[in-house]
Image: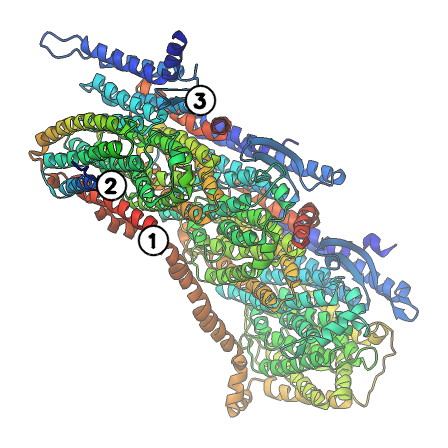
Amino acid sequence: MTEIPISHMLFVSTALFFIGMYGFFTRRNMITMLMAIELMLNSVNINFVIFNKYLYPEKMDGIFFTIFVITIAAAEAAVAIAIIINLYRSHQSIDVEEADNLKN
Amino acid sequence: MTDQLIDFFLLMKSELLLLAVIFIMLFMNITAKENADGTPVDNNHSILVTANILLLLNFLAGFFMNTSGNLFGDSFTSTELTAFQKNILNLGTLLVSLQSYTWLKTHKHVMEFYMLLLATLLGMFLMISSQHMLLFYLGLELSTIPLAALVNFDLEKKKSAEAAMKMIMMSAFSSALLLFGISLFYGTMGTLHFQEIPAALNGSDLQLYCLILLIAAFGFKISAVPFHFWTADVYEGAPVPVTSYLSVISKGSILFVMTTVLYNVFAGMGVEWYLIICVLAVATMITGNIFAVRQQNLKRLLAFSSIAQVGFILVGMSGQNTEGAVSVTYFIIIYIFSNLAALGVISVVSALTGKEKISDYKGFYKTNPMLSWILAIALFSLAGIPPTSGFFGKFFLLLAGAGNGNYTLVIIAALNMIVSLYYYLKIVKAVFMDANEEPIPTINLAFFPKAGLLICLIGIIVTGLASGSYNYIQELFASL
Amino acid sequence: MNLNLLILIPFLTAMAILFCRSLPAVRSIALAGSAIQLVLSLVLFYLFSQERMINESLMLFEQNIVWFKTLNINYHIGVDGISVSMILLTAFVVLAGVLVSWKMPKATGGDGEMGREFFFLLMFLSLGAYGFFISLDLFTLFFFLEVAVIPKFLLIGIWGSGKKEYAAMKLALMLMGGSALVFVGLAGLYLNTYTATGLHTFDILEIANMSINLDMQLLFFPFAFVGFGIFTAIFPFHTWVPDGHSSAPTAASMFLAGISMKLGGYGCLRAAVLLMPEAAHYYSGWIVALSAIAIIYGAFATMMQTDLKYINAYSSVSHCGFVLLGIGMLTHTAIMGAVMQMVSHGLMTALFFAAIGMIYERTHTREVKKLGGLLKIMPFISTVFVIAGLCSLGLPGFSGFVAEMTVFVGAWEQVDAMYRLATILACASIVVTAVYILRAVGKAIMGPIADQHHLELTDARWNEKMAAGILIIGIVAIGIAPFWLTELVTPGTTAIMNQLNGF
Amino acid sequence: MNYANYIYLIPLLPLLSFLLLGFFGRKYVGAASGWVGVLSLGTSALLSVYTAFRYFFVDGLMDGKYQTIIPVKIEWLRFSETLSIDMGILLDPVSVMMLVVVTFVSLMVHLFSIGYMKGEERYATYFSYLSLFTFSMLGLVLSTNIFQIYMFWELVGVSSYLLIGYYFTKPSAVKASKKAFIVTRFADLGFLIGILILGFSGGSFDFATLIATLTNTQSPELTTMISSSFLGITLLSWALTLVFIGGAGKSAMFPLHIWLPDAMEGPTPVSALIHAATMVVAGVYLVARMFPVFALDPAVMQLITITGITSAVLAAIIACTQTDIKRVLAYSTMSQIGYMMFAMGISGYAFNDTGYTGSLFHLFTHAFFKSLLFLGAGAVIHYVHSNEMKDMGGLRKTMPITHITFLLACLAIAGIPPLAGFFSKEEILLAAWESNKTVYFMALGTSALTAFYMFRLYFSIFWSKEAAHHDNHHGEGTFTMKLPLLLLAGCTIGAGLIPFSNFVTSNNIPEKMELHLLFSIAPVLLAVLAIGIAAILYKNENDKPDKIASSMNALYRTALNKFYIDEIYLFITKKIIFNLIAKPAAWIDRNIVDGLMNLLGNATIIVSDEAKSVQSGKVQWYALAFLGGILILTVAFIYLY
């Protein structure tokens, strides 16, 4: 089995990153936006892993980074969702477009 | 083994002490007594006294037994400089804590406030000491995520929730971009260790792109234009003490890190980041000032003014010499005092009357002369008027910036000072000159806020006139 | 003599004022403090004259304390004759200002008249002025220059009249603009100095002994000069003067026009011309042109004013033009004239504002059209007004004549046709000055009584008489015997000339 | 007694009395103020006469030439190595002569004023002003330095201003004082620039040095001043012309004379002192002071001549039509000063200097008879409370002393021998005859006109109709008012007999006075004829004058309206300077210069307002901006830079 070249991998991760970003810009539901962020983070994780695997297999930096990113993403999501829930209580909506009272 | 252990304790002294405080708080929270009907006993005052005393001790402890050395495979470092920077943040936190007394006294979740607050501080400490991107990233996130929760700390307020949402969304977005940058860095260099990066820098386009992403992440935290949009909304929506914390401590810590990272780690790409910083500085100063001119809400105004201040700091940072680093650090101290004094007054007034508009402050002098003077002096310091220390801070920042030969930048900065003076004076005008039918009633300050404000006031006056602090920072940087 | 006393006394006075409760106590302390200042400055004058006989060095009573070591910023103070004359002027005006404010102007925004704050700010302002005049380090100089901005803002905004907030804001912003330019100029100068230790320096005496790169001089001279020039109402950045002066309470107007505008002229001389002589030569045509415009244009603009304070404010623009003209001419006599004009204008305009303030306090109007025949009602105040006016139009026997003539004679030494034209224009302003002064005097002081209610008004009180007396003594002392002043300033101006001719 | 021991007292005594009366007069001296002034002036006058005696007869003359003595001189203000203002006292024939004239006339005026000003509210102030004026005038005539003269020049100007505006509640007085000051100030501008040129190019402000340098044909200063020119006129001419403009302004020469008639708003004794005898001749004095230098430049001398003769003729014509007696006298003064001026202009230096001597001689005699005329007029005005001729008439019986002295003065000014005016006028006419016939005939005509209008005045006041019944509460005046009239009348008779050229000549070498009796026939006859015509027309009330006036309507109207010169000035100042310069300047300042400043501020505010919408409150937009920032930086630094 031939090895998949790194460029393929990178293509996937980059695509994932920008898909996530697109989602972040276009979705109006806050939860969906969070999911989009997760996509972006995951693309980063793929990056780390493939760089580690393909380019610098002698050290484990990338892998470790990935683990920490996953952890922190979870924590971030938890806090974010808590905030969103709280927001829902006061706004009765989790539509990001409607949360624009603070402006100018 | 014992030696190592002692070293470990000494090197991580700040972090460990902070952890200890957090755990004491946690313990107190767990063991909190409840009333017969299950509601917690209202012992806020004693909690606040304890917390403030602990923070004071923490701050005082920061002066002693600072050693230098590395830990965790050289990814954590502690030097005199980091110890000093951490202690600056300790002081700032103490001041914020003192000033939040009025607000917290009637709040239901005092303990949680402190735990979250100190957790972010811990994150900043880690960040300052980090010698590895991983640790840096961990510190960054640790200092951001609890802050979002803090922004939402007035749970019942609509604005608070919205602000928190904006903050968490934006910080998640920015950290995603930062991580993307770091991952690419990793790809190009194979290492994320600060000591190894300089050798691995080759100035390629990809690395430059990564650097831009890194600076953008910094820019987000210090609210440099165009990464600043969240700032005003969050500052306005958050409870005033949190705003204070965000605007000085959080920003200050990032600026410390940014100085270290740019000056030491990315010195090899100095030409590139210098230009980026210049562009950001100009954009930040101008935008911050322009937006601040027409604000009616004081918190929002100070948010934009703090953006403008960051512009000035970036000018200093663009100096790329020891003076640059020194003046940035020095200015942060001054900025902490000045901004906390201004926000401290606003915090007290806001907590007691809920008034935050400039027009509410008309005739303030008539009822609260002392607070008015403190506010005015703080604003003068922010505007850079002598004999307040703000003058010295700004002067040295711009001097450092000019030291690199970029006089245009300095001219733009100098002109921006005029605009900034305008909106600061607008507040002063409302306070001193305008008559008001219903001025804010006379406020009786509790001991803690009063102490906090006085410390700020002394700091504002002394830090500049007495050259000691500047010379000390200079020595710290020179010894690196 | 320890020059720090000059800063210390106002500081201590200000501090003492802070701890006073009642207005009488406050103003007594302020009066005592400013009287001590005057005595101190006279002592300084005496000691300086004594010391000058045996000591040849440019600056006397020097003190040099390291402040920010690594930046080579020192607290370096010392005086030469120019500074001493400025210090004397400050002391005179401060004392007169305190006396005039005996009955406080009404304050807005605060509680009652706020006497404590008023005198505190006045003392603070004088502290800034003293500090500025004794500084020999550009940083210290700039520090004290800016110290004075905020008190002015507050004084005008709180105790002023008319469009006071607008005026206060305008003044603060324009002066801040001036400071900003000064900052750029000084910082640029600093960064182009090289000392033996490898550090840059802010020290005026050290910089004077170096030759700064010509390109850099050409780049930074305009910043420094225009920056300081804004304080001295350089055309076209003079518009803060009319608004600021006319809205300010009497004492603040006196300080503003009497002292504050002199900071600019002194700065131009000390920081710009002395330190960047080649650039001064290069730009002298511009300076002369701008100041000639300011002189004649200011004078014509004054003719159309109907508010007494506006009249004096615009005439200040015109008169301060002489200062800049003298500096721009770059001849020894002209520069000496500029210094004398600074002193003279300081005293004269303070006297003018004092008189206007007294009239306004009684009649509640400054409109020339609503006044008339005041000589009959309040002869003392009217006489003071006329004396100030006559000094303003350059009558011999008063200081204005001496100063203006010195500037003219010095200016004429520049043979270039453009300079000559500027000089003639400047000379022509004496006619225009006569026109507007006499119009004001003729309408307000002489003529039939405009308002029968004015007949009930009283003449000057003791404090006002003393204030006017002090200033008139100063004016006449220069007008009758100018030689002491020229002797005082000559070594200083000679040093500047040597610098200018030294390449 | 050495000059230096006392000479400074002459100007300082009036100064002292000014200070005393100015500070304490109103409260403490009160009614005695007049006597304080008289005392100080009397002492000054005595000292002056003593000085004159000593100078002319004891020690002034050495080696056949009157020496210039400078007993007192201090350096007052040093400008540069060569230029300084020195304060000093210079004694030479001209200044000593002027010293006597000024102190004497001033003393007379002081005396007269004691009665005339009695009961005035600001009695002490009046005398302090008078003293101030006398001090300034003495300082002026004793100056050693051209800048010193300029200083006192300004001081006399301001004292004149104060005295004209003495009745300050009268708008016309205020206006007149303002006009006098501003017009002379305008002239002084020329003087000042002239001084600057002379000082810079001539190398000194000191008269002696300046004259010595510039009359030395070898000196580089003179060479420079003659060789360099501006607009085709040499520097020397410029300087002298400008200095002369200063003199012309003070001496009310055409076209700068417009202030003098209005200046009659002041108290009449003041007019006698300032606007007849002393200050207005300062211009002549100035030319005399610098005569050696003026004589170097024929063009300027010609200008002086033209100005002088034009003023003389013009003023004489106008004087014939005026009805206010003080105005008639004012124009007559102007006309007589024109005489002096053109006499200066036609004179040569050292030889052929009859004009010079005549001019100063006329100055000397004119001071006496003109102040006498004014004081007489003052007495009349005091008596009838009006300035207008129509309110007078037939006063010869009620005011005998005034009448006689006035008549004497009229005869003197008309040039009837052997009164003072005859001798001096003859000298001037002689000089004119010798140098320029046109000038001579014009002067002769003027002389006749002078006789005519003076007697028109005299007859209208003292003859004409019968005396109206004035409430005669104070009679002809007190003794202090009559005494000066008599003393001055004495001088008017005697002054002409002084052999003037024995004392005052252009090069200070005494000459013998010659009388050309034959030459005098024509002028005297003409004068008598003119007096005759005046007598026919005005001795008794009739309608002949009106008929004549209407028969030459245009000329009469023009003269009555003073040749519309005032209107021209008014047009220039009000319409052109005010509307075209001052108003636009003020407007531009408020709207354009200040507008630009405000615009900067307002623009910032507007931008700020507009920019606020960028902060939309939408978090996705923020993130987009974030990304945009990164993209811009990326594009800028990776692809562009």
Label 3, label 2: how far apart the Cα atoms are: 35 Å
For the N terminus of chain D, the image quarter is bottom right
Q: Secondary structure at mark 3?
A: helix
* Residue kind at label 1, given as amino acid type: Leu
Camera-nearest label, 2 or 1: 1
**Chain ID at mark 1:** D
Question: In the rendering, which numbered label is found on residue D506?
Answer: none
Task: Residue B418: give x, y in percent of width and height.
Answer: 40, 46
* Residue kind at label 3, given as amino acid type: Glu
Camera-nearest label, 3 or 1: 1
Q: Residue at x 39, y 59 (%)?
A: D590
Q: Relative to C58, does residue B17 appear above or below in the rendering?
A: above
**Neighbours of disc 1 within 10 Å: few (<14), some (14-19), many (20+):** few
Q: Secondary structure at mark 2?
A: helix
**Neighbours of disc 3 within 10 Å: few (<14), some (14-19), many (20+):** some
Question: Do labels 3 and 1 touch, CB within 8 Å?
Answer: no
Q: Relative to C101, does residue D555 appear above or below in the rendering?
A: below
The single residue placed furthest to the left in the displayed view is: A92
Q: Residue at x 57, y 74 (%)?
A: D258
Q: Residue at x 83, y 52 (%)?
A: D5
Label 2, label 1: how far apart the Cα atoms are: 26 Å
Foreground: D318 or B208?
Answer: B208
Residue under circle 3?
B80
Colouring chosen for the image of the structure: rainbow
Label 3, label 1: how far apart the Cα atoms are: 42 Å
Q: Is residue D257 left or right of residue D365?
A: left
Q: In this rendering, does residue D220 appear at all?
A: yes
Residue under circle 1?
D640
**Chain ID at mark 3:** B
Camera-nearest label, 3 or 2: 3
Q: Residue at x 73, y 69 (%)?
A: D488
**Chain ID at mark 2:** B
